Image (cartoon, rainbow, N blue to C red):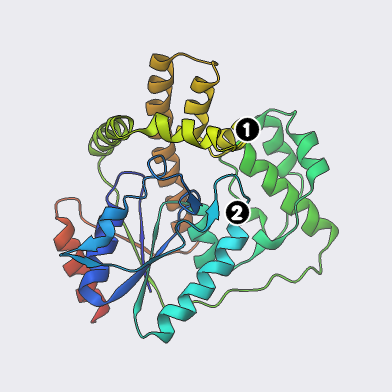
Amino acid sequence: MIVILGPTASGKTHLAALLAHRIGGEIISADSRQVYRGMNIGTGKDLDEYVVDGKAVPYHLIDLVEAGEKYNVHQFQLDAQRVLTEIEDRGNHPILCGGSGLYLNALLQGHSFTGIPTNPKLREMLEAYPHELLLKEFGKKTTAYSPLADTSTKKRTIRAIEINNFLDANPDFPIPETELPDFQVYGIDPSTKLRRERISRRLKERFDNGLIEEVKGLLAQGVPAQTLIYYGLEYKLITQYLTGEMILVEMKQRLETEIHRFAKRQMTFFRKMEKDGVDIRWLRNDQTTEDWVETIVENMNE
């Protein structure tokens, strides 16, 4: 299995599609928001990328559920395992592609802490505390999950506390391990300047192509505003704009800033994956996407 990861607007999908076309591959999307139908522009599905030289490249785990429904990393693990088996049965090459670090890491690291049940009462209580206090609370218990936890945001820290508390109270809880084919991980890490230019350009294109109208349509279909806000970034800030919480200029400025910050957090997460044992081969920035394809193919044939 080939894994392609990188921050938003780095060209992951384009590389995955060219590679799949070259080697007879099928793409498995590792994106926490592209699973939702009707959320196309804001999540950057770019479905036209999956056609190379007039031939459709098979892709999976996109448009799985309706916007507003629940989907989580544990469900992703189950779906990815199912799709992996199907691709292997067809004799094709699986290519895992995405930027959702939690999804990628949960699959590649072979653990399933994601199956630990939620604790709504605990979550409600923890929501009242600032992130700094939550980090201190997380550090009070040490479990098998502690070194793997992502505490980069308040929401993720609350989940980490939830998992730690459960494991501390249930030390014999079995953690099933996932089985993966051999895999190679390739990373795209554009320069900060280039990444920022691409993010700004792509965001403008999304606004021009109807991003605000997409969010307005989801609200009109009955997707609750709070659910869209939960999805973050584009959906959060545009919903807040549409509900009168901020003006258009403010929303656009804040959104661009938040996407830049998000890309930086993605890279921080990928570096943490490396520290935790995932071997990421970073592709050279002085090469073209076609060069990257050749590099990956050569490594596959070693």
Residue 109 seen in the figure: no
Res 226 label: 1
Count neighbours of disc 1 (C-alpha within 10 A) and say few if under 14, some if 14 to 19, many if 20 or more.
few
Count neighbours of disc 2 (C-alpha within 10 A) and say few if under 14, some if 14 to 19, many if 20 or more.
some
Assign the C terminus to one quadrant of the image.
Answer: bottom left
Circle count: 2
Query: Residue 12 falls in which quadrant of the image?
Result: bottom left
Assign the N terminus to one quadrant of the image.
Answer: bottom left
Outermost residue, front side? 221
Amino acid, disc 2: Tyr
**Going by the image, does 150 lie left or right of 122?**
left
Residue 117: give x, y in percent of width and height: 75, 57
Q: Tell me the residue that label 2 is attached to.
A: 71
Residue at 31 percent of width and 74 percent of height: 25
Residue 106: give x, y in percent of width and height: 55, 61
Task: Look at the numbered discs 2 and 1 and tell me whether their residues touch, using CB distance below 8 Å.
Answer: no
What secondary structure is found at the residue carrying circle 1?
helix
Residue at 45 percent of width and 13 percent of height: 247
Dot placed on the residue nearer the N-terminal end, 2 or 1: 2
Residue 246: give x, y in percent of width and height: 50, 15
- When the figure is inspected, residue 92 is found, relative to residue 31, above or below; the finding is below
Outermost residue, right side? 169
